[in-house]
Amino acid sequence: MKKEPKPLVKMLAYAFLVLAVLFSIYPVWFAFLASVRPGQRLYTLNLTGMFLPTEFTLENFRVLLFEKDFLLWARNSLFVASLTTIACVTLATSGAFAFSRFRFKGREAGLILFLAVQAFPGVLSLVPIALLLYRLGLFGSHWGLILAYSTGSLVFTTWNLKGYFDTIPIDLEEAAMIDGCGPVQSFIRIALPLARPALAVTALFGFMGGWNEYVMASVLLVGQADKYTLPIALAQLANDIQVPWGLYAAGALLVSIPVLVLFLWLQKYLESGLTLGGVKG
Amino acid sequence: MGVTYRGLRKYLVVLFFIAPTLLGVLVLSVFPILFNVYISFTNRNTYHYQQFQLTAENRAAYLEEHPHGAFVWDVICPVFPAVCCSPDTMGVYCIQRPFYQNYVRLFQDLFTVASLLSLGRLLLAILPLIGVAIASGQVHKRMVSPPATGWWWLVAAAASIGLWYLLKGQAALDQLFDTGSFFVVMFRTILYVVACIPFFFLFGLILALVLNNDWLRGKGIFRVLIIVPWAVPSYISALIWQFFFRSEHGTINQLLGAIGIQGPSWLQQPALAFFAVVLVNIWMSYPFFMVIILGALQSIPQEQYEAAEVDGANWWQKLTRITLPLLRPAVMPAIVLSSITTFQMFNTVWLITGGGPIRGAGMPGATEFVMIHAYKQVFQSRNDGLIGAFAVIVFIILFAATLYSMRLTRITKGAYE
């Protein structure tokens, strides 16, 4: 076991973490304050009001949850994001495993192709994607959106997982192969459990890709209010005259909660060196 | 593992793993790009937007004009109808004559002769410095006991300063900035990427290292609170930050005012506006890097550290000799790909500064990065052909940069190669 560091080092570490947390959450806390303030204002001239809720109402949350179709939008988003996550993790893992573990002709070319795809301004792919989904009969449906999202995140997630597989010593899988495992078996039973931290990252990334995306959803689901995902639905709350800040802020907070819950659940995979257990076990 | 499988069998296994991934990328990522390239050669815009119809009537007209064109009509046109019509046709989009006309127009707009000359003068002025950099690099690589190259730099610097005055470097610089040259936009965008990425990595790394300690309490809570910026929809957080930076009633200036400091007008001063968009981008991205690095740290075998400790390594040596090299393959993709997305950043910057502040009409603003410039200058023309051509140019520039960075960082290689 590692020895405990000096108290001073510990204190510095905690201080740094507290600062980072403040930096991270103050803007969001600010949004929270706006969401519980009566009226649709983002700002307050009251100095305490910038740190603590001086007036308190849950009116914005009530309107959002019960007068708007928030729950429907949330269900749509959840459906799209979870299927995106599953598709993204499955596709990325198998591709990344092949790129990392096999040496074949066209391997480097394939990796470079993946990077090249990313170098193209994504917004400009929208029209061809819409056209393609239209031809496939998936335009305006959640399935089309899922398809677009999961392939959209695929490039990064494949690269990221490939990078992670590269850091796992190949010896374990070779040992398994010598003991008679096939490639699929050694992939599922050895490589996947070892790659759990990266799978957690991939899952989170895939989920975010489906959950918080705005531009593509607004094009591919145009005019179908019952299919809206949360980001477009929230944006639609604003009219031309004013931004309903209270509702916006409340919506932003509600949208963030599932992501944070997912991360809470996934973060146990970001603990403890896995290869350690693997090698010694 | 290549040891076990050879020939056809190996390829079948590889195909099994890679085919779904590759298919997805080919259909929904590569096809849109190719389609865009195709559109970039056409005159598609608000007046020419329909697809050319391959009717018998049109076929007859086409064959009259091209007596040997039957093959083209029957084989190429079903896939690319725009090849077979003339750009004068009403309402229909067709390949331009010459087909690269959009590119010529875009190049003339983006790279004017005057700005190319100015850029050439500037490059010529720093040529001695570049020469010495390359030469000394080669000398250090090839020679066993390289000579001291310090005085080379002195000579080169003197030569550069001389050339700067001779070629009127200042005037060239002014010309570039004053005419709203695309080079300036490119330069600012690169500066933006260079200002952002190291902080993403550094903040993410430090936090991940601190959070990876066994003795730390409340890890779970710290981690969740730190990734909050990633979870909030980015257009809402961009609007919140925009509000923070306002000069009147903006949160930052209100807080500064409370302790008696008159805050600056953040978004009206070039340097401060640039700082603001860098800060917001860091705020949005460092949680992501923290998570990636936290994941990557798990793959480093604890034995490596134990062995290093036995050999008496201090924490700095452990960081630079074990942690960083072993993180490289897992973190490099994130760095390269977020460099690309930062280069192409539009939404966040647009919502905060709108590309401004500008010094005068016709000059690009201090935060007018490539995609914002494109939006202002090209996209609003609703000329799809021109937009496509712009996308292709951005693509070529970024892809070349990516390939070059791959050579530097060897990211296609594994950690143990």
Image (spheres, coloured by chain):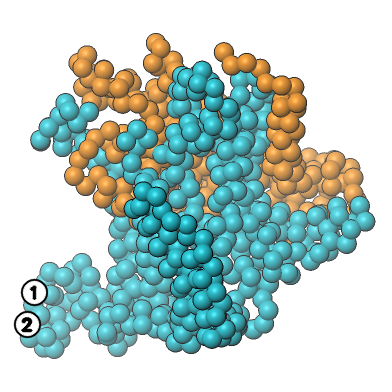
Chain colours: A orange, B cyan
Tell me what residue is drawn at x 11 percent, y 71 percent. Answer: B74
Q: Position of residue B208 (x, y in %)?
A: 58, 33
Tell which of B268 and A247 is nearer to you: B268
The quadrant the N terminus of chain B occupies is top left
Q: Quadrant of residue B172?
A: bottom right
Residue B363: numbered disc: none
Compared across the picture, whether B222 is left or right of B312 comes to right
Type of the residue with mark 2:
His
Q: Secondary structure at mark 1?
A: helix
Does B356 sit left or right of B176 as displayed? Answer: right
Q: State the CA–CA distance, disc 2 to disc 1.
A: 7 Å
Cβ–Cβ below 8 Å for labels 2 and 1?
yes
Tag 2, which chain? B
List the residue tagged with mark 1: B71
- Horizontally, residue B376 falls left or right of residue A107, namely right
Above or below residue A120? Residue A6 is above
Mark 1 Cα shell of 10 Å, populated few (<14), some (14-19), many (≥20): few
- Comparing B405 with A96, the one in front is B405
- Mark 2 vs mark 1: tell me if same chain: yes
The quadrant of the picture occupied by the C terminus of chain B is top left
Please give the residue where the numbered disc 2 appears in the rendered image: B68
Number of numbered discs visible in the structure rendering: 2
* x and y, in percent, of residue A138 in the image: 36, 51
- In this orientation, does residue A92 appear? no
Amino acid type at image mark 1: Phe
Residue drawn at 58 percent across, 33 percent down? B316
In what element is the residue under mark 2? loop
The x, y position of residue B101, in whole percent, is 33, 83
| Residue lying at 30% horizontally and 58% vertically, measured from the top left | B31
- Which quadrant of the structure image shows residue A48? top right
